[in-house]
Image (spheres, grey):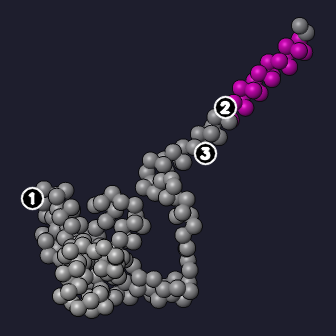
Amino acid sequence: MSIISKLTNSWAQADEKRLRIKYAILTVALFLPLFWAFLAVRNVYPVTAWNVMMAGGDLDRGRSYCILRGETVSGETIDVAAIQLTNALYSRNWTMVNATIDNQAFKLQSIHPQNEEMLRQFGGVEHLPPGARIPDLLQAWGDIYNKREPASSPKRLKAIRLDMYRWESGRYADYDKFVESWRKEL
């Protein structure tokens, strides 16, 4: 074997080694953030597929949104993340809240006997106040939150509330118009 072919062969091996190292670095650089996102983000496949298709920045339509807050025994007002209470997917929690505010449970074909009784008391679904079952939802969330705190903790909730706000649309401002609040003593 000639010296030239030996040099060419060693350069080719060195180039191949460098190329493998570059591809390994590129692979890690691409897949490490994806792997971290898979571990850290709650919305995993296939949920992320339809979250990509969610409307973002639609200025033509206003929206209402809610914030869950708690009042601790120490007197502090804190934001409570519903997703951490129920381990549900983020948007599904707020879909449930919106359905509860709209009294959708009273419009089902087969409704719960307690809901039937409430309908009789109010004289029909059209006479129900918005969010007739919100106190029950707040009670459940408050109980779940307090079960995670020691009995002597100043972070235990004495009350929990759901505040509804409205954004009227048209511009990316004025998104904090207060609409209504539901409060439940625990």
Secondary structure state at the residue bearing disc 1: loop
Q: In the rendered view, would you say 82 is above or below 35?
A: below
In the foreground, 118 or 52: 118
Work out whether mark 1 precedes mark 3 in sequence or the reverse, and give the earlier one.
Answer: 3
> Magenta segment range?
3-22
Type of secondary structure dominating the magenta stretch = helix
Work out whether mark 1 precedes mark 2 in sequence or the reverse, and give the earlier one.
Answer: 2
**Residue corresponding to mark 1:** 151
Query: In the rendering, at what x and y percent does residue 20 appear?
Result: 69, 30
Q: Relative to residue 74, is residue 50 drawn left or right?
A: right
Q: In the rendered view, would you say 155 is above or below 33?
A: below
Give the residue at the far left of this rendering: 152
Instruction: Please name the amino acid that badge 3 sits on.
Output: Leu
Secondary structure state at the residue bearing disc 2: helix
Residue 30 disc label: 3
Work out whether mark 2 precedes mark 3 in sequence or the reverse, and give the earlier one.
Answer: 2
Q: Relative to residue 58, is residue 78 drawn left or right?
A: left
Assess whether residue 97 is covered by the magenta stretch. no
